[in-house]
Image: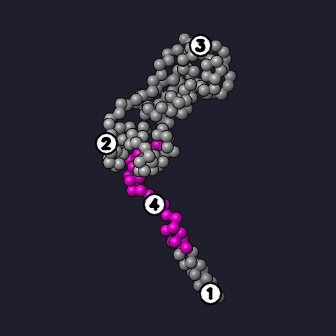
Amino acid sequence: MIGQAILVLGGLGLGFGILLSFASRKFAVVVDPKEEKILEVLPGSNCGACGFPGCQGLAEALAKGKTEATSCVAGGAEVTKKVAKILGVEIEPKTELVAFVACRAGIKQAKKKFKYRGLNNCQADALLFTGDKSCVYGCLGLGSCAKVCPFDAISITAEGLAVIDPKKCKSCQKCVKACP
């Protein structure tokens, strides 16, 4: 009786093992070695600043030639050079960009037109008569830019102005899109 159980279970194990081996070959995902090399070079921050859903998506697009070697803004010039070398392409050096807030009108300088009571979001505030500050071009100070910055390069001062740390800014331009 025990011998039969051992034979049945052994046979089932062998059968399922064979099925799994065929399934692993049938459904195997072939990964481009170039994609793996690119993924090793990328910073792994998965910030999405490149427009792809993380570093894996960018590596896949780069390997397939769907985007340029300069797409990774988080990695900077060093990563761009390494990616270009893997892809076998030449790149021109880009000028490093840093976000800049030109507004200097804080709470004391720019008077409030009304008391804003709504979403803590600059876009929502700007929809109401171009914002609650008397200066229509001024920083609204609700921090929408700081919330979307994947590098913590933006902070909001007590005066209600966005301040950018140029050492942390990678010029991903997410703050530009978030600012009305």
Give the distance between the C-alpha atoms of the residues marked 4 and 2, in whole angstroms: 27 Å
Crowd rating for badge 3 (residues with CA inside 10 Å; few <14, some 14–19, many 20+): some
Residues in magenta? Answer: 19-46
Q: Which of marks 3 and 4 is nearer the N terminus?
A: 4
The quarter of the displayed image where residue 159 is located: top right
The quarter of the displayed image where residue 69 is located: top left
Circle 1 residue: 4
Is residue 25 within the magenta segment?
yes
* Quadrant (top left, top right, bottom left, bottom right) of the N terminus: bottom right
Circle 2 residue: 90
As drawn, is 79 to the left or to the right of 154?
left
Which residue does the image show at 47% across and 19% down from the upper left? 102
Q: Which amino acid does label 1 sit on?
A: Gln
* Residue 30 badge: 4
Q: Which of marks 2 and 1 is nearer the N terminus?
A: 1
Secondary structure under tag 2 reads loop
Nearer the camera: disc 3 or disc 4? 4
Q: Between 142 and 126, which is closer to the camera in this rendering?
A: 126
Q: What residue type is labelled 4?
A: Val
Circle 3 residue: 134
Nearer the camera: disc 1 or disc 3? 3
Which residue does the image show at 35% across and 38% down from the upper left? 77
